[in-house]
């Protein structure tokens, strides 16, 4: 397999894993809504993901896998933050 193909497949596998990582916030959000409040530091994750999405989309050659991998972190990080306060 060429290195180019390896990097392409690796980037998409990493994208899927990053999305799954942020989807794993759902149980914490459910706990927060049930009254078991957690630390609202998930706002940091949302800010971090926002910066990565902006970076990926503003590059001369857009980096769509990076943007897609971090976009769920914005949504789920904000929801986790709001439900924790």
Image (cartoon, grey):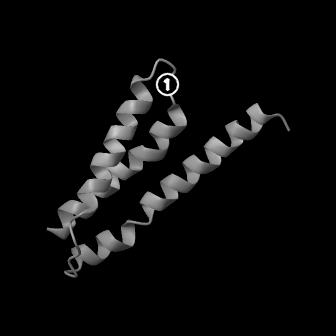
Rendered position, 64 above or below 49: above
Q: Quadrant of the C terminus?
A: bottom left
Tell me the residue at 27%/61% (across/down).
Answer: 42
Q: In the image shown, does 31 or 55 lie closer to the viewer?
A: 55
Q: Quadrant of residue 50?
A: top left
Identify the residue under disc 1: 62
Residue 71 in the image: state x and y as whole percent: 40, 44
Rendered position, 51 above or below 85: above
Rendered position, 34 above or below 84: below
Q: Quadrant of the N terminus?
A: top right
Q: Is residue 1 visible?
A: yes
Residue 43 in the image: state x and y as whole percent: 24, 56
Q: In the image shown, does 25 or 33 lie closer to the viewer?
A: 25
Q: Is residue 78 visible?
A: no
Query: As drawn, which residue projects farthest toward the front?
Result: 3
Whether residue 6 sits left or right of residue 16 in the image: it is right
Tell me the residue at 51%/53% (across/down).
Answer: 18
Q: Quadrant of residue 28?
A: bottom left
Residue 11 in the image: state x and y as whole percent: 62, 42
Tell me the residue at 30%/51% (across/down).
Answer: 46
Numbered label tally: 1
Tell me the residue at 47%/17% (across/down).
Answer: 60
Residue 47 in the image: state x and y as whole percent: 27, 47
Query: As drawn, which residue projects farthest toward the left?
Result: 85
Query: As drawn, which residue projects farthest toward the top?
Result: 60
Whether residue 34 sits left or right of residue 14 in the image: it is left
Q: Quadrant of residue 70?
A: top left
């Amino acid at each position: 397999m060429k290195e180019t193909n390896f990097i392409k497949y690796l980037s998409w596998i990493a994208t899927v894993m990053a999305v799954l990582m942020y989807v794993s916030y759902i149980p914490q959000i459910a706990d927060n809504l049930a009254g078991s409040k957690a630390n609202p530091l998930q706002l940091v994750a949302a800010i971090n993901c926002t910066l990565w999405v902006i970076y990926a989309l503003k590059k001369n050659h857009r980096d769509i896998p990076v943007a897609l991998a971090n976009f769920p972190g914005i949504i789920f990080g904000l929801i986790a933050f709001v439900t924790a306060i």
